[in-house]
Image (spheres, helix red, strand yellow):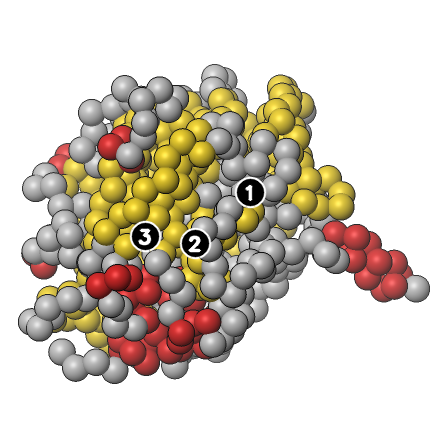
Amino acid sequence: MPFYPILSAPSCIGRTTLCNFPPNNWEKPSKTPKFVNITWSSGSIWNSITLDYLTYGIAKSYTLADLPTDIPQGVLPLLSLTSSPLPRLSQVLPTVSSPNQLPTWRASLELISSNASTSYQGELDPLPENASLLTFPPLLQTHSTINNFLLFLNLERSPVMRKTYLKIFRCCYTSRLLGEFSIVSNSITCISLDSLNIQANELPVFVSPNMSGVPLFFATTEGFTSMSLEHTHPPASYVIHGKRWAAQKYLKSRWISQPD
Amino acid sequence: MTSYINLFRLATWKLWQPLVAVPSSAKSVVSDLFVWRNSSIFKTYFELTSIPSLFENISPYQRHATIFIFDACGCKINEQILTIEPCMRRTLDLSYLLPNESGSCGTFAIFHSHTPDSVSTLGSFVAERGYVGYSYQSSILLSYAHGNLDAVAFQANSPVQMLGRSSLRRRSYMLQHLLTPPYYYEIAVVNPTNSSQTIRFDVLSICGRLLQTSKVSLKSRALHFFPVSPEHENLKIVLHSRLVMARPLVFRSHDSGLDVFHG
């Protein structure tokens, strides 16, 4: 089973609901109680604490308020479900095996304001440190009273919180670079997108040559009365069958190596 | 011996039951089977981008995509060619593409002009799994959900080919999301196969007690909404069918707005 982050975003709290029941009936699920662990990086080591114990068939929600007070503020809290407790300290991210492949065992990852909430069914697996990010999000909402954010979610096996950059370009036009932002591994980086002045008919491209991640697009009306949250696909999702990952590699070589 | 039994058991679930079949023509392009809603409460938008132009420079004759719109029973009600500039975004308002008396919901597919050579040489097909935005009541904000199943293949001058496959055995899909008061839920299921499919929809209490069950027969490309309104307790749902992956689209609404996501 992968990890399930508790998300964060401006003026919102994150709530993650874990289910101790499988998504299907044919991958032979173990009908046993499971430990709920909370894992976070302190920069040089992974910390894990057993938070709860879920009996089979049950689902339960967790927010930051449910976590022990000795977890530092600002870290990315990662929930997991395991049949035995995770080690208290580890040099690499503990391995959390998954009994399910199709579909993946998911949780409800939610952002809640005082007036609204938005969610998606998700999970987070560790990404290779030498991976890159390329995505073409058509999800920016350009109404003047809507605020748009990128929530860049990364998890790697190493506990080191390394910093690199993410560039945002226009797909078209000669003056293409719209902005460059810092992103940090093993965390959720929030980037406001409204100052980039991306027009409704423009397709942006988000590129990070040195770090992969899950790009979540969070939009909210002023006052947080309505909210939207969705992730974009990796480039491999533009094709089906055959050598999909070779197609992704081709697309990355075409877009990531381009000059500004 | 036990491992042989397990292998046999898994084989009955996996052999000859791919999630998505390979299109019969190498020149096909593929699309998800998306859900549209059109009423005084809901509007639907699709974020169209030219996927072929991300792989290669395309000619002016390739700057288009074709939309097929189906009603709730899976019958085609419109087919239209849409222009799209390379590397740009075009937000389609589905309400302008629906004929009169189309009903309040249905499915649609978007097919790009071609599969670029750089993709076809890898044995792959361009697939549209893009982003559908739903507006709810008077909100200016769209709630987005991405495509999740490459369901339909198309080649010019040929009928569409459904790529979803039936399972040898009935399968259960347990939504890993708790349905909670005071939200109103509509669980949308589409049929991506070429034949009618029966779907049983169970609503369970958190401890697994069956509270409600309903059954529907869905024609190819058709859509059905199962409504659930939890009143006093959290609920779970299970979909039973011969679909290899009966992954639903969930609409969760309340006075405060709409949340749409895939199971």
Q: Is residue B175 visible?
A: no
Which one is in front, A76 or B114?
B114
Circle 3 is placed at which residue position? B65
The amino acid beneath tag 3 is: Ala
Mark 2 vs 1, N-terminal side: 2
- Could you tell me which residue is drawn at 28 percent across and 34 percent down? B97
- Could you tell me which residue is drawn at 76 percent across and 43 percent down? B169
Q: Are marks 2 and 1 on the same chain?
A: yes
- Could you tell me which residue is drawn at 62 percent across and 21 percent down? B214
Which one is in front, B186 or B154?
B154
Q: Which label sits in the foreground, 3 or 1?
A: 3
A75 above or below A165?
above
Residue A133, horizontal then vertical, whole percent: 32, 71
Circle 1 is placed at which residue position? B192
Task: Count how many numbered circles sit on residues in the image.
Answer: 3
Between the residue at mark 3 and the residue at mark 1, the CA separation in whole angstroms equals 21 Å
- Report in which chain the residue with disc 3 lies: B
The amino acid beneath tag 2 is: Ala
Which residue occupies the extreme right position in the image? B1
Circle 2 is placed at which residue position? B156
The amino acid beneath tag 1 is: Pro
